[in-house]
Image (cartoon, rainbow, N blue to C red):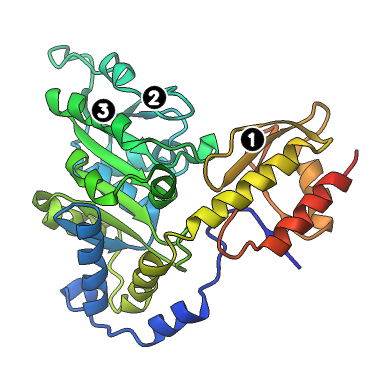
Amino acid sequence: MICDLRSDTVTQPTPAMLDAMMHAKVGDDVFGEDPTVNKLETMCAEMLGMEGAVFCASGTMTNQIGIKILTQPYDEVICYQGAHIYKYEGGGLAGNSQVSVRLLKGNRGRISAEEVLANINNTKDIHLPLTTVVALENTVVREAGSFYRLSEIEKLSELAQSKNLKMHLDGARLFNALVETGDRAIDYGKHFDSISICLSKGLGAPVGSVLAYKKEYETKARRIRKAFGGGMRQAGFLAAAGIYALNHHVARLKEDHLRAKKLGEALQKSSWVKSAMPVDTNIVIVEVIDGLTPEMVLSKLSECQIKALPFSATSIRFVTHLDFTDVMLEKCMSVFSKINF
């Protein structure tokens, strides 16, 4: 029995999801004629309190389109120093949008209105790029799935509006945050100009992300998707999986969180673990003891058919998901306690 905890992107479609995919009605999405894609886009826009949305191949694509529709070359984006849009998207901010980045430390990746205010450039100083966008990530992948509450976002939104700044949300795991906070997805729309959500992470779809936005960005977002090579033609088969995921896999994210907490508790008791970040959602990050490397630990885990991901020179990441069961959890907890160096 293989326990794959490298990411929540490793899930397989459920039988019911596969059935929905196989029976999807499709058309040419580049011509706007795929009814299932259109349904997914309308569904996501309404769910997030937005006016439009576009279905894309990946969260990287939706994030990159989101930043590009809100900026001009030589602008500056404010974000957390470990933000996915900065660290894990291949330098896309520089290459695709030609913007610079102001990196903030935040509190476990959650930047505050006070930090943002202190880092907005003077528009009259020609030596400095124009600050135009505040980008948030919810949940924060590098901080073990820490999350914003809507009350924190409201403060940032008020500041952004007062300073004529746009707001982008990398909501790859937004629904993981929402099942913990109880906030409503529809209330996010009033605070952001663009919102990216992933269907292929905790929600368990095989492929796809959606970028929702204000109506004024509709044509520009689709033009940029085309320029990025993102036209997918009969994409309704994939969109059907996303619709199924949104209808059936949101509430169950709580199960992933509970298993992650138990996993974290077991890891903290393990002799090879030095410390662990707080477990807020479905991501567990631990530091290994001095003298060990993540690769040394992962080699031992691999022998027991447990997969995880080296996350830094001293840390390992584990991510729970819908294909990680209670039986697998028990196996992992047993293996963790038996590993010695």
- Comes first in the chain, label 3 or label 1: 3
Depth check: give the residue in front, 240 or 186.
186
- Comes first in the chain, label 2 or label 1: 2
Q: Position of residue 222 (x, y in %)?
A: 19, 59
Does residue 43 lie above or below 175 as drawn? below
- Comes first in the chain, label 2 or label 3: 2
**Disc number for residue 69:** none
- The residue pinned by badge 3 equals 156
Callout 3 amino acid: Leu
Cα–Cα gap, marks 2 and 3: 16 Å
**Disc number for residue 103:** 2
Q: Is residue 90 left or right of residue 219?
A: right
Question: Quick check: marks 2 and 1 in contact, CB under 8 Å?
Answer: no
Image quarter hosting the C terminus: top right
**Disc number for residue 312:** 1
Circle 1 SS class: loop
